Amino acid sequence: MQIELKTGAVQLGPNQTLKVLDGAGSTLCALEGALWITEENHAQDIILEAGNCYRLRHPGTTLVNSLGGVAALSLN
């Protein structure tokens, strides 16, 4: 199952994926669990632990996956 979100908060189940479209400049914060972030046209993936935030830097599609269990995040 894929979820699309422009802004707000969401909880992802184990190995669930969130697709962010054209999110460059938005800030993604891990509220619970860990997140695996893959930005289009960026060779390095990001692992984000609870309590940390990451500013999306690249235009296009970003995939955010819960890593190892349930994860909660906000996107602003």
Image (cartoon, rainbow, N blue to C red):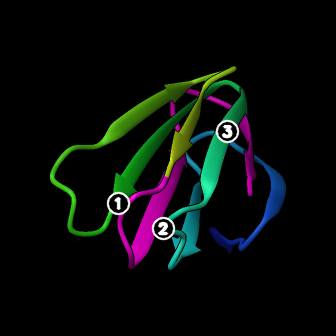
Residue denoted by label 3:
29
On screen, residue 71 above or below 55: above
Q: Image check: 39 left or right of 22? A: left
Q: Amino acid at mark 3?
A: Cys
Give amino acid for label 2.
Answer: Ala
Query: Residue at 52% of width from left, 40% of height from top?
Result: 54
Query: In terms of depth relative to the viewer, which is nearer, 69 or 7?
Result: 7
Question: Which residue lies at the image location 67% right of the left edge and 38% below the top edge?
Answer: 29
> Residue under circle 1?
39
- For the residues labelled 2 and 1, the Cα–Cα distance comes to 9 Å
Which of 74 and 12 lies nearest the eye of the viewer?
74
List x then y, in percent, for residue 61: 42, 75
Identify the residue position indicated by label 2 in the image.
24
Q: Are marks 2 and 1 in contact (CB under 8 Å)?
A: no
Residue 64 magenta-drawn? yes
Distance from Cα at disc 1 to Cα at disc 3:
15 Å
Closer to the chain start, of discs 1 and 3, is 3
Which of 2 and 32 lies nearest the eye of the viewer?
32
Secondary structure beneath label 2:
loop
Q: Is residue 16 above or below residue 52?
A: below
The answer to whether 43 appears left or right of 67 in the picture is left
Nearer the observer, disc 3 or disc 2?
2
SS under mark 1 = strand
Residue extent of the magenta highlight: 56-76
Question: Which amino acid does the dot numbered 1 rest on?
Answer: Glu
The quadrant of the rendering that contains the N terminus is: bottom right
Look at the picture and state if 20 lies above or below 60: above
| Front residue (pair 10, 43) | 43
